[in-house]
């Protein structure tokens, strides 16, 4: 097994990515490029990630059950949730748009929460199962999670553009607020998780055998 960054006293900055060497073995180091704190592992990574994941799970239900938009047309008000919007586009034959909204607004946030919970449990159980695949899964989850903001941007644009008084008007519903919170919290949850924890059991097992 090749030498790890911990064994060679190398620390990567979480903000700018610069790799520094802890020559003197200090507990507290500062990145020479951006002055951020350097840590061998993110402090309290598992606890902070669990807290954010639980908060996102709590907000996920109202985000999908409460109306995300209120549309007023000629005095008639219609409230739509994310799923009712998906069903509306399906009924009018707009399958590609319905698929994009369902994927970005329903599937991606839910899958991101499931993946983060799986990674947290596997790390806490000190699992050495498919470390590389779990790391790739984390990187993919971290990259695609922010695309869920597409639905929030669409609602924001519609609210800003459709302001025709009694003729037509679109207002954001409470569901949009909860949905934005879910997306933002899951982004912070992915950032707070330290993927290097996935490899620690293999390193500890290697040290125990030698």
Image (tube, rainbow, N blue to C red):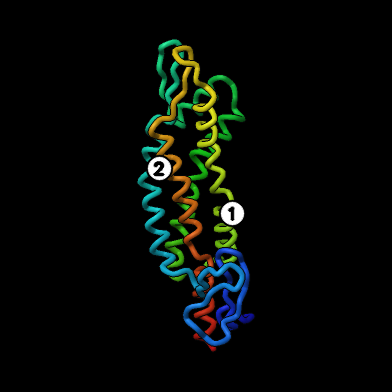
Quarter of the image that includes the C terminus = bottom right
Place of residue 48 in the rendered image (x, y in percent of width and height, measured from the top left): 40, 61
As measured in the structure, the alpha-carbon distance from the residue carrying label 2 to the one carrying label 1 is: 21 Å
The residue at which mark 1 appears reads as: 140
> Element at badge 1?
helix
Question: Image quarter for residue 172?
Answer: top left
Give the label on residue 60, or none. Answer: 2
Residue at x 60%, y 83% (from the top left corner)? 8
Label 2 sits on a secondary structure element that is helix
Cβ–Cβ under 8 Å for marks 2 and 1: no
Residue 209 against residue 123 in the figure, above or below? below
**Which circle's residue, 2 or 1, is located before the other in the chain?**
2
* Classed neighbour count for the residue bearing mark 1: other residues with Cα under 10 Å, few (<14), some (14–19), many (≥20): few
Image mark for residue 43: none
On screen, residue 98 versus residue 174, left or right, reads: right
Kindly tell me whether residue 116 is visible in this rendering. Answer: yes
Does residue 4 appear in this view?
no
Identified at 50% across, 80% down, the residue is 204
Where does the image place residue 111, in percent across and percent down from the top left? Answer: 49, 48
Residue 46 lies, with reference to residue 188, above or below; the image says below
Q: Position of residue 5 (x, y in %)?
A: 59, 77
- The residue closer to the viewer here, 155 or 58, is 155
Residue 9: % across, % down: 57, 82
**Residue at the (50%, 58%) spot, across then down:** 191
Q: Quadrant of the N terminus?
A: bottom right
């Amino acid at each position: 097994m090749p030498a790890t960054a911990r064994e060679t006293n190398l620390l990567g900055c979480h903000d700018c990515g610069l790799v520094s060497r802890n020559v003197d073995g200090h507990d507290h180091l500062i990145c020479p490029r951006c002055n951020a704190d350097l840590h061998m592992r993110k402090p309290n990574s598992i606890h902070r990630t669990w807290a954010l994941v639980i908060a996102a799970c709590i907000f996920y239900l109202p985000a999908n059950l409460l109306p995300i938009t209120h549309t007023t047309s000629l005095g008639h008000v219609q409230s739509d949730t994310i799923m009712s919007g998906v069903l509306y586009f399906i009924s009018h034959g707009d399958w590609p748009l319905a698929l994009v909204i369902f994927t970005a607004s329903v599937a991606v946030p839910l899958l991101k929460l499931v993946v983060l919970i799986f990674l947290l449990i596997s790390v806490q159980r000190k699992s050495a199962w498919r470390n590389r695949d779990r790391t790739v899964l984390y990187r993919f989850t971290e990259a695609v999670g922010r695309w869920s903001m597409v639905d929030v941007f669409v609602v924001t644009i519609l609210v800003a553009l459709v302001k025709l008084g009694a003729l037509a008007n679109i207002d954001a519903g409470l569901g949009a607020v909860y949905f934005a919170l879910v997306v933002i919290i899951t982004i912070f949850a992915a950032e707070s998780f330290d993927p290097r924890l996935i490899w620690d059991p293999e390193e500890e097992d290697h040290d125990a055998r030698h």
